[in-house]
Amino acid sequence: MVYFYRHDDKKKTNVFEETKKENKWKENWIIFKRSLLFKIFFWFIFPVTLVNFWVFRYDDFSNNCHIKIKLSLLEWNNLRIKKALKFTRDNSPNYYHKVCSHIDIISPDLPCGGAGGGCFRVENPRQIEISVENHRDNSSLTAAMIIHETCHSIQYQDKNGALSESECYHEMNNFLQELNIDSPWKNYQ
């Protein structure tokens, strides 16, 4: 029998037993790769996890902005909200910072504001509801709705809960005016 001494603990070890242990791990790995469990993981769980992070999250690591976008039964495309967030990032860093620092979750369900509107609920001040139903192809209007609802979140979190619609319409209209976009909400108070 062939023995050798390991230098770290001076124990006598059988070379053939070490090789058998390594081969056993390789055999077990091959068996696992052929198993149904591995196939389920590789073809279902892994892709679902990737899709979850690609579709249901907005992550901008360079600006430390991470927002969860909830699954919606009525509005299937979360990419519109992502486009609106990217539009805000590229065109108005000040408003983008406000959104990123005050909002954790965006729910695209039909909000209390109706189709094309938004909603802020005091029960969850770091979550807003945004519907892109009436402005599907216009990222600037969706971004303006996000800014309007973020304004309510800021009012609730930083200004002791005093909510003002006129202040948030003013913020939303300022955002669109900075970008030279005519606001459909310019007459709202």
Image (cartoon, rainbow, N blue to C red):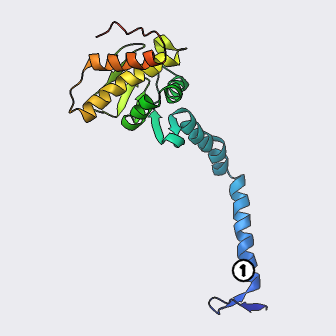
Residue 157: x %, y % from top left:
27, 35
Q: Circle 1 sits in a helix, a strand or a loop, which is it? A: helix
Q: Is residue 150 among what the camera can see?
A: yes
Q: Quadrant of the N terminus?
A: bottom right
Residue 77 rendering spot, x and y as whole percentages: 54, 23
Q: Nearer the viewer, residue 149 or 25?
A: 149
User: What residue sits 70% from the left and 68% below the top?
Assistant: 25
Q: In the figure, is residue 144 to the left or right of 33?
A: left
Residue type marked 1: Glu
Q: Which residue is mark 1?
A: 18
Q: Position of residue 9 (x, y in %)?
A: 62, 90
Vertical arrangement, residue 34 with respect to residue 154, above or below? below
Image location (x, y in percent) of residue 158: 26, 35
Residue positioned 52% across, 14% down in the render: 136
Does residue 26 lie above or below 149 as drawn?
A: below
The residue depicted at 42 percent of the width and 27 percent of the height is: 107
Viewed as shown, does residue 164 lie left or right of 140?
A: left
Q: Nearer the viewer, residue 147 or 181?
A: 181
Please tell me how many numbered marks the rendered image carries.
Answer: 1
Q: Is residue 147 rendered to the left or right of residue 9? A: left
- Residue 132, above or below 14: above
User: Residue 127 sits in which quadrant?
Assistant: top left
Residue at the top extreme of this rendering:
187
Q: What crowding class fits label 1: few (fewer than 14 Cα within 10 Å), some (14-19), or many (20 or more)?
A: few
